[in-house]
Image (cartoon, rainbow, N blue to C red):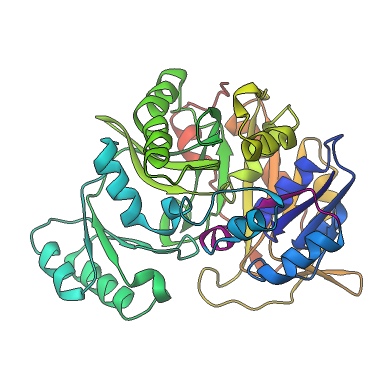
Amino acid sequence: MNILIIGGGGREHALAWAVAASPLITKLYCAPGNAGISQVATCLPIGALDFDQIINACKEHDIDFVIVGPDDPLAEGLVDRLNEERIKAFGPTRAAAQLEASKSFTKELCKVRNIPTAGYGVFDTPNAALAYLSGLNPPFVIKADGLALGKGVIIASTREEAEAAIGEMFAGAFGDAGKKVLIEEFLTGEEASFFALTDGKSILPLASAQDHKRVGEGDVGLNTGGMGAYSPAPIMTEAMTAEVMDRIIRPTVEGMAERGTPYRGVLYAGLMITSEGPKLIEYNARFGDPECQVLMPRLRSDILPALIAVADGVLGSVDLRWLEETALTVVMATEGYPKSYEKGSHIRGIEAAEALEDVTVFHAGTKSENGALLANGGRVLNITALGKSVTEAAETAYKAVDLIDWPEGFCRRDIGWRAIDTGKSKSKK
């Protein structure tokens, strides 16, 4: 088969790395890709939102199957376009991708299907939002309704911070994503990410992970696209997984089918495990980034047949096997991220890092120029290691980080801290 992966980040490198190992592959392409992806696939200089050129490339290269990585082409309807051209694709349609593209859409589904989630209000004017805020006590959770590169959530500890966040969102800080604003109840508990494949009827649980969103150690500072992750999340026991499936995932799949917008793809549920049980924070309509970078190294099975089965509507015949080991990834970002940063700094030492046993470096914002590896984005590298525990995986990952020569880069030094500090670092299936 000729396969095309859409995207150019760390998630897409992890997918390309996994898919490239499949015996079903004849030729693997990626658009636009990055310097790391180019080692396992042919990169095409086509943007993820350039649908016409993507269609042309599919025809030119006899593409049999397209895997859509990022959220924005899903929200803009790339899978719909591919379906119109009778090109098989993995990912939800535009209507189904509203689960991520509109937080208010998901909240309404939760209300209809009785899916546990935080209390909330949805507003399309600042005055209405501020009036609702006046009846609440801090901390406050302020969210842009639409896609905001993982940065459209503000946790405000004071009323003044919340009012400022509301003003900034309605003033266009997140573009069209902030035309509607949600104010949510602040949930107390431990966050976890849970992933499942679905073809709109059958559901195949994948694995859990825990992300580190804040830029600073100890989970402080601005929200980012993710500064690191590990899998599995110890809090996601077999009993908790069963509860999440019964109370959150299945009602979602059934509710989407009832609406006439069946969901086919990967469901990425951001959860808060509270004293009352798991509650849905939000959905993503694609593999997480950097969570995908810890899921793929733990997968013993060939991922490609499962993705094809989703598109074909025969997921019920598929099973996947996972390594018991923990995978942990540390994101190396350009100084200044998630605010302004410079591109073009030189990175050295990747080969030395990957020479360590059980280490893989997934590229995100990188490019190759005249034989040199250059930083070409905010989040640039994902240093991923396997270990018998979170502690062991973290030690190996940071050994690899220290072998990379990139003065303009930085990372958090506490990825996995929650599992390590609470002594829950033993891996579980």
Residue 196 spot, x, y in % from top left = 53, 34
Q: State yes or no: residue 130 in magenta.
A: no
Residue 307 appears left or right of 73: right
Q: From this viewpoint, which residue is outermost toward the left?
A: 135
Total tally of numbered discs in the picture: 0
Q: From this viewpoint, which residue is outermost toward the bottom?
A: 171
**Residue name at image x 71 percent, y 36 percent:** 297
Q: Is residue 137 visible?
A: yes
**Residue name at image x 78 percent, y 58 percent:** 30
**Residue name at image x 47 percent, y 42 percent:** 262
325 shown above or below 257: above
Residue toward you, 292 or 375: 292
Residue toward you, 45 or 351: 45
- The C terminus - image quarter: top right
Q: Is residue 408 visible?
A: no
416 shown above or below 227: above
Residue 393 spot, x, y in % from top left = 65, 35
Q: Quadrant of residue 79?
A: bottom right
Q: From this viewpoint, which residue is outermost toward the top?
A: 239
Q: Quadrant of residue 314?
A: top right
Residue 8 spot, x, y in % from top left = 70, 61
169 shown above or below 120: below
Residue 249 appears left or right of 129: right
Q: Range of the magenta residues?
A: 62-75
